[in-house]
Amino acid sequence: MRRLLAISLVAVLPLSNISAAHAQEPADRQQAFAAAAAEFQVPQSVLLGVSYLESRWDAHAGQPSSDAGFGPMHLTDAAAFTGGNHHHEGEEDARGDDGRPLPAPPESPAEQPDVPASLRTMERAAALTGESHEKLRTDDAANIRGGAALLADYQKALGAPLSDDPGEWYGAVARYSGAEEAGAAKYFADEVFSVIEQGVTRTTDDGERVALPAVPGLDKIEKWLEKLGLRPPRTDGVECPASISCEWIPAAYQELPDNDYGHYDLANRPFSQKVDYIIIHDMEGYFLPSIRLNQDPNYGASWHYSLRSADGHIAQHIKTKDVGWQAGNWYINAKSIGLEHEGFLAEGGTWYTEAMYRSSARLVRYLALKHGVPMDRAHILGHDNVPGTLPTTVRGMHEDPGPFWDWAHYFQLMGAPLHAFGSPGSGSVMIKPDFATNKPYFYGCDRKNPSAACPPLPASTVWLRTEPRADAPLVKDIGKHPTGDSLYSVYDHSARATTGQRYAVAERQGDWTAIWYLGQKAWFHNPADAPTAVPSMGLVVTPKPGKATVPVYGRAYPEQEAYPEGIPYQAVTPLQYTFSAGEKYTLAGPAATEYYRAVTFNLEDHKVVRGKTKYLEIQFGHRVMFVKADDVQVTFSG
C-alpha cells in the first residue's frame, strides 16, 4: 500500500509540490528511482543506467568509493578526499632487483590531492535538492534524488529538452562522468546506454532487488556530447582496445647523475621475453597525483597504465614492450604489465566503480589475448599475490588491491568467468564466496581509528583457521609475522584465500574444508547451502618420494653456469616456508627460467640470461611461488 501511494503521489502531484512529497520515503530502492525520475523529469531508464555504471545500485554501507563517491549515484564529496599514494610507503622496493636496489625516494612536501569540480558533485546536488551532505551520503533515496537533480541540471545547461526519449539525454549522461576528455565522456555514455539497451536485474549488497528493463533500439543523440566542448585526448601509439577511452601520457625516461636513470627499463617484449602476468594494483591515492609520480624520473616506481575511477578513463605511460618498476619482484616485473587503479585498499575508500571495472576488464582481456597471458588467477595477479624475492623482502610486499576488489565480477566482465570444474568431492577447490553477501570481519578501514571494526562490506576473501571451527586461531604466515600471529587487519592477507585462487584439498569435516596453505592445513567455512569454494580439478605437485621437504622460491632465476662473463650471478635463495612430504599445491604451469639484466640507460646493453633448470609456478599461500621441477612430482587431482 505504501508503494502504491508513493507511485500515485508522483503521478498526480504538480512538479512544484514534488519536493514536499518526497518527504514520504519510497518503499524500496526501485521506487526511489521511480520517484526521483518523476520528480526531476529524467527517464527512469537513464537514471538507473547511470547509477548502474557507477555503483551497480549498491549502497556500500555509506562508505566512500575509491574517489570519494557515495551511494547508488556516486555523489562525490571533496570533504572525504584524503592525500597520499601507497608507493611512498612501506619497505617494498618497486623494482625488486636485489642486485640493483633503488635508493630511498626523495622527501617531498605533503601534497593536497587535486579535487576538480567534477569530483565535487555532492555540493551541487545539495544545492539543487536542499538535502544535507550527511543525508546525501547515507540515505539512498536522497542520494538518488541528488543524482536525478544533477542529470536534469546538466540537461538544462546543454539546452536539451527534459524529454521522455532516453537518447536525448546522451550529453547529460556524458557530463555526469565528470570527464574532461571527449573520448572518456563518450565511453561512459556509451556504456550507460549499452546497459539500458540490454537491461539488467540484480540484488544489491544490502538485499534490494532492482530491475532495469531492456530498452532496445535506442537512438543516441550524440550532438549533445559535442556541445560539452571537451578536449580530445592524445592517443598516439596507445595500446588499448578501441571500445575504451585511452590516452598517452608518457612516463619520464631520462639519464640522471652517477650513471643512474629513471624510471623504467627499455626492453623488446615479447621478442626478448614473453609477458606472462598482468598485475592489478590500486594507487592508494588519486589519479592526477599518481600520474605526476610516473612523470618524475627521480621517483623509483613506474607502471604501464593508470585507470580513473569516476569514468574508467585510462592513461598509458609505458609501452608494453618495456619493463615497469611496479611489482616489487624483478622476475615478475620483467615478465608483466602493471595496471594502477585510482583508489584505496580501505583507507579513504572501500569500493571501486563499475565504470573502472569495465574499462579495466576490457584492457586486461585485450592485453592477455595480445600477449598470450592465461586469463586465470595464477597469471592475472593482484599486487598482493606477487611473492617476495628473498626471505628478507617477504614482509614488506604490498597488499593491494585488497579484499574489496570483486574478482568474480571482474573476470565475468573479462569474458573469462570463474566456473566450477569437477565433482563436489574433487581434490582441489577454487575460492569463490558470493561477493555481495560475504562480509567477513576486518578492522583498519578508518584512518582516524585504525583499531575500529570496518563496516560490514562485500569482500572476495575467506579467513583460514587452524581448526574447523569459527573461534579457532588464524593460520600463521612466518614470512609476514616471524614471531607473531596473523591479523584481522584489512591490510594483512596472512590468513586469507581470495576468489579465483585454486588450492589442493587437505581434508573435509562437515561444513569445513581444509586446504594446503604455506605448509599447513588451513580451514575455512564452506557449507553446502552457501559455499565459499567450488570444485576445481587439475594438476597438483607434491615432493618426490624420498624428499622430506623441498624449497620454494620467489623467482625462477637461472643456475649459476648460465650467466655469461660480465653478468653477476643472481642467487636463487629459498624463501622461509616449508613444503613437506604429503602436502599438495595446485600447479599453475611452467615458469620460464630467466633473468633480465638491465642496469644501463641503453637498450643495447640489456641481456636476457636463460637457464636449463625447470621451474613450476604453484599457489602456495596467498601469493604464488615457484618450485624446481626436479624436486616435485605432478599428479592429477580429480
Image (cartoon, helix red, strand yellow):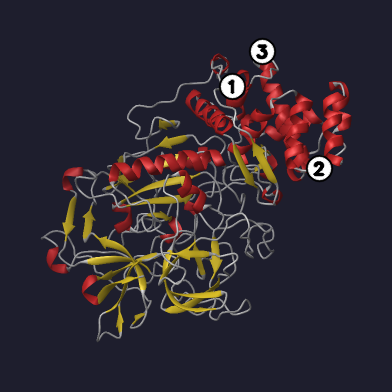
Judging by the rendered image, the residue that carries numbered circle 3 is 159
Secondary structure type for disc 1:
helix
Tag shown at residue 522: none
Residue 556, picture quadrant: bottom left
Percent position of residue 327, x then y: 39, 55
Mark 1 neighbour class, 10 Å CA radius: few under 14, some 14 to 19, many 20 or more: many
Q: Which mark is residue 170?
A: 1
Residue type at mark 1 is Tyr
Residue 243 at x, y percent in the picture: 43, 31
Q: In the rendered structure, which amino acid carries the disc numbered 3?
A: Gly
Q: CA distance from mark 1 to mark 2?
A: 29 Å
Q: Is residue 222 left or right of residue 479?
A: right
User: What residue is drawn where x is 81% and y is 39%?
Assistant: 26
The residue lying toward the viewer, choosing from 496 and 321, is: 496
Element type where label 3 sits in the image: loop
Counting residues from the start of the chain, the first of labels 2 and 3 encountered is 2
Which mark is nearer the camera, 2 or 3?
A: 2
Q: Is the residue marked by circle 3 packed among few (<14), some (14-19), or many (20+) residues within 10 Å?
A: few
- Mark number displayed over residue 27: 2
The kind of residue on which mark 2 rests is Ala
Q: Can residue 517 be seen in the rendering of this structure?
A: no
Q: Which residue: 30% across, 41% down?
A: 370
Q: Is residue 354 visible?
A: yes
Circle 2 crowding by C-alpha within 10 Å: few under 14, some 14–19, many from 20: some
101 or 324, which lies in front?
324
Q: Residue at x 17, y 52 (%)?
A: 607
How far apart in space, not on screen, are marks 2 and 3 (Cα)? Answer: 34 Å
Rendered view: 377 above or below 574 = above
Earlier sequence position, callout 1 versus callout 2: 2
